[in-house]
Image (cartoon, rainbow, N blue to C red):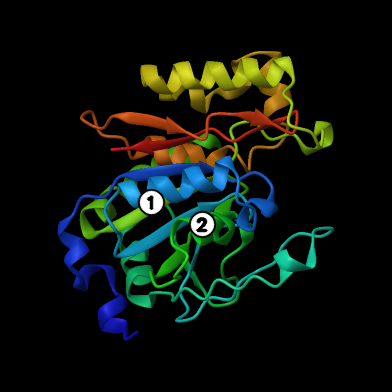
Amino acid sequence: MSQEKSSAASTDAAEIRMPVLFVGHGSPTNAIEDNEFSRAWAATAAAIPRPAAILCISAHWETVGTHITAMERPRTIHDFSGFPQELFDVNYPAPGDPTLARLVQQTVGLADVRPDAAWGLDHGTWSVLRRMYPAADIPVLQLSLDRTKAPAFHYQLGQELQGLRNKGVLIVGSGNIVHNLRLVSWQDTAYDWALEFDALMQQLILAGDHAAIMDYRQLGESAQLAIPTNEHFLPLLYVLALQDKQDKVAFFAEKVTLGSMSMRSLLVG
């Protein structure tokens, strides 16, 4: 695929205003299992316009400063251990798009976005996209999470990406609203506190109360248990920041499993 063809600004899809997605990616094995979550991801991809390019904010790329992948051919990163060999054998050979990476750098004013040629696509990105776009023929970029910044920064940075929606770019936040690996139970079950926080977040999202969501530490004990560290929560803020007044929100894969992991995902737009 030539760079001219891969660039988001040079395709027919650039005429389409894209929705925005937050996907609860859960266990890496969702990439190879035919289950209710992988089927929901595939169905969502089939229901929205085909993007010219995809920009993913994954929980699994934390940096100091903000970085964007800018290589022609990002590698598939197997950033986990203890899983079946079949998962390590997966390759997701989607192209990159250096032209789009430069556009993102020019678009963002809140941070000095630095081009990255080393990272690639981690499992927060490819485990989901493999089910949504199995042909791996859409350019994919990742934007990192600056671990030194507060939630409000990530929300404001997300707002600056708004114009990309009009260029055929599908922006995907990949994480989990409830994510506590210290309390995980390898069964299809859910703790009461996890259900409580997941339901509260649904209510706040539907109410458009983004301020309360950003200030999640004030939401009680269930929030402390649901978000012991916030890297899986922050991608949601990018997606909510991109919601316009006319954008509706639809939920999919609405389930808490493994005791302490919410798979709740949402489509904005």
Q: Secondary structure at mark 1?
A: helix
Check the image and name the residue furthest to the front: 34
List x then y, in percent, for residue 23: 50, 43
State the image quarter where residue 218 is shown.
top right
Determine the image quadrant of residue 82: bottom right
Name which residue lies at 30% across and 48% down. 48
Q: Is residue 29 above or below residue 12?
A: above
| Horizontal side, residue 133 vs residue 229: left or right | left
Asked if 245 appears above or below 231 in the picture, the reply is above
Residue 126 in the image: state x and y as whole percent. 56, 61
* Quadrant location of the N terminus in the rendered image: bottom left
Indicate the amino acid at tag 1: Ala
Mark 2 touches mark 1? (CB < 8 Å)? yes
Q: Which mark is residue 10?
A: none
| Left/right of residue 56 with respect to residue 17 in the rendered view | right
- Residue 131's disc number: 2
* 204 shown above or below 229: above
Residue situated in front as seen by the camera: 84 or 92:
84
Q: How many marks?
A: 2
Q: Which residue is disc 1 drawn over? A: 45
Q: Nearer the viewer, residue 39 or 126?
A: 39
Apparent side of residue 114 relative to residue 206 in the rendered image (left or right): right
CA gap, disc 2 and disc 1: 9 Å
In the rendered image, residue 215, in percent from the top left (x then y), is placed at: 54, 23
Label 2 crowd bin: few (<14), some (14–19), many (20+), radius 10 Å: many
Give the SS element for disc 2: helix
Vertical order, 115 against 197 (above or below): below
Please tell me which of labels 2 and 1 falls first in the chain. Answer: 1
Residue name at image x 58 percent, y 37 percent? 233
The amino acid type of the residue labelled 2 equals Arg
Residue 187 is at least partly visible in this image: yes
